[in-house]
Image (cartoon, coloured by chain):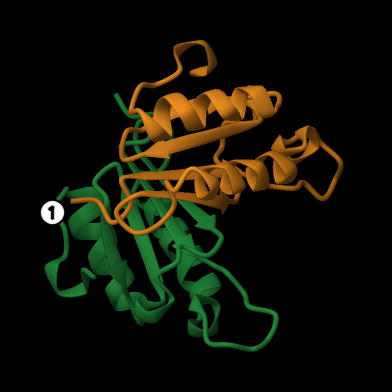
Chain colours: A green, B orange
Amino acid sequence: MSHFSKHVFFCTNKRANGETCCANHGVDELRAYAKDRTKALGLAGEGKVRINSAGCLDRCDSGPVMVVYPDAVWYTFVDKEDIDEIVESHLKNGKAVDRLKI
Amino acid sequence: MSHFSKHVFFCTNKRANGETCCANHGVDELRAYAKDRTKALGLAGEGKVRINSAGCLDRCDSGPVMVVYPDAVWYTFVDKEDIDEIVESHLKNGKAVDRLKI
């Protein structure tokens, strides 16, 4: 069994030279929001959900991106409504959000 | 199919208050070494292996730690020999290294 049933990695990479990257899209705020929501819903913890930051996930052209493991489902997102949908549908109920998949 | 067949996350978290954490164990150097080795062996890239940094993976007591997804296999490690074994056995040949699992 996986240590976390859903282990989510947000790309929070920042490029020093000012090139576009995930961090230009409010990712820190949206990751914090996802973390708060999973805690508020009682989803966070061992055997359950973990929201993580990560370095560059090498999918910059699709950014901002996150990936949910062990499902290996990748998403892009633009706002808190997208995060809400991923948390509610995928992390809580196990149903991936097709419209946000990359 | 998973975008990366083996997506490896090294905890590279640094605690501001000096508490013990994965970053106290030479993780940056060992992660760089893993990245170099996977490139040298031709394992790196889309559909293949990705070596990533990550924030705190919340397994500090077992640190330093890494996790290989989508397999959801967790390891601890102390030196380049351990990294070599994980790269060769797990990332190249798909066989997890039992002695380093946590």
Q: Vertically, is B88 above or below A42?
A: above
Q: Residue furthest right?
A: B18
Q: Is residue A26 above or below residue A3?
A: below
Can residue B72 be seen at all in this image of the molecule?
Answer: yes
Q: Chain of mark 1?
A: A
Image coords of residue B87 (percent x, y)? 50, 32
Please tell me which residue is depicted at 49% across the width and 74% down the height of the picture.
A27
For badge 1, the amino acid type reads: Lys
Q: Mark 1 highlights which residue?
A: A95
How dense is the environment of label 1, judged by Cα within 10 Å: few (below 14), some, or many (20 and up)? few
Q: Is residue A38 left or right of residue B22?
A: left
Residue at 35% of width from left, 82% of height from top? A78
Residue at 63% in and 24% down: B77
Rendered position, A18 above or below B38: below
| Residue drawn at 74 percent across, 41 percent down | B23
Q: Nearer the viewer, residue A35 or B29?
A: B29
The one nearer the camera, B88 or A24, is B88
Viewer can see residue B56: no
Query: Which sits in the foreground, A68 or B34?
Result: B34
How many numbered discs?
1
On the image, the x and y values in percent for residue B30 come to 68, 39
Answer left or right for B29 relative to B54. right
Residue B59 in the image: state x and y as whole percent.
57, 31
Q: Position of residue A12 (x, y in %)?
A: 54, 67
Is A83 left or right of B61, judged from the image as shown? Answer: left
Query: Could you tell me which secondary element the residue under label 1 belongs to?
Result: loop
Q: Quadrant of residue A49?
A: top left
